[in-house]
Image: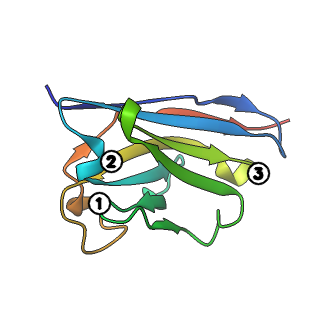
Amino acid sequence: QVQLVESGGGLVQPGGSLRLSCAASGFTLDDYAIGWFRQAPGKEREGVSCISSSDGSTYYADSVKGRFTISRDNAKNTVYLQMNSLKPEDTAVYYCAAASLLLRLWALYEYDYWGQGTQVTVSS
């Protein structure tokens, strides 16, 4: 059974850090590009970060560049999103997704599998 499971979300104060995990089962993550997306209440889902399957290139939305880092641990079949210097506007449900062939980085329809999401709340 193909599955992506996110974990690591929670409540954190502004300026704090969280590390999200995206664990895959039923397929090998390094055969796929992995994207992290987020969706805040009343807003559309937006791309946050992506790591390619070919050479491990990483991409970030301008809003998180310099604060978030995406990485992959192939031995654990897991992708991580390290989030530092968190801001209240980072509050959202965060999803990971896997794409076998990615032509448009943030196009939701290009991703084959999605996790169920994990809530991140940044508040004092």
Choose top left, top right, bottom left or bottom right for residue 82: top right
Q: Residues within 10 Å of mark 3 (few under 14, many from 20)?
A: some
Horizontal side of 113 relative to 93 (left or right) equals left
Q: Does the residue at mark 1 contact the one at mark 2 (Cβ under 8 Å)?
A: yes
Percent position of residue 73, x then y: 44, 40
Percent position of residue 86, x then y: 75, 48
82 lies above or below 121: below
Which residue type does callout 2 highlight?
Ala
Q: Quadrant of the N terminus?
A: top left
Which residue type does callout 3 highlight?
Lys
Q: Does the residue at mark 1 contact the one at mark 3 (Cβ under 8 Å)?
A: no
Q: Calculate the distance from the C-alpha at mark 3 to the C-alpha at mark 2.
A: 23 Å
71 lies above or below 56: above
Per the image, the residue denoted by label 2 is: 97
Percent position of residue 24, x then y: 30, 33
Q: Calculate the distance from the C-alpha at mark 1 to the C-alpha at mark 3.
A: 24 Å
Between 53 and 85, the one lying in front of the other is 53
The residue that appears at 29% across and 74% down in the rendered structure is 104
Residue projecting furthest to the front: 75
Per the image, the residue denoted by label 3 is: 87
The residue that appears at 51% across and 49% down in the rendered structure is 71
Q: Residues within 10 Å of mark 2 (few under 14, many from 20)?
A: many
Per the image, the residue denoted by label 1 is: 108
Q: In which quarter of the image is the C terminus?
A: top right
Choose top left, top right, bottom left or bottom right for residue 81: top right
What SS does tag 1 mark?
helix
The mark found on residue 54 in the picture is none
Which residue type does callout 1 highlight?
Leu
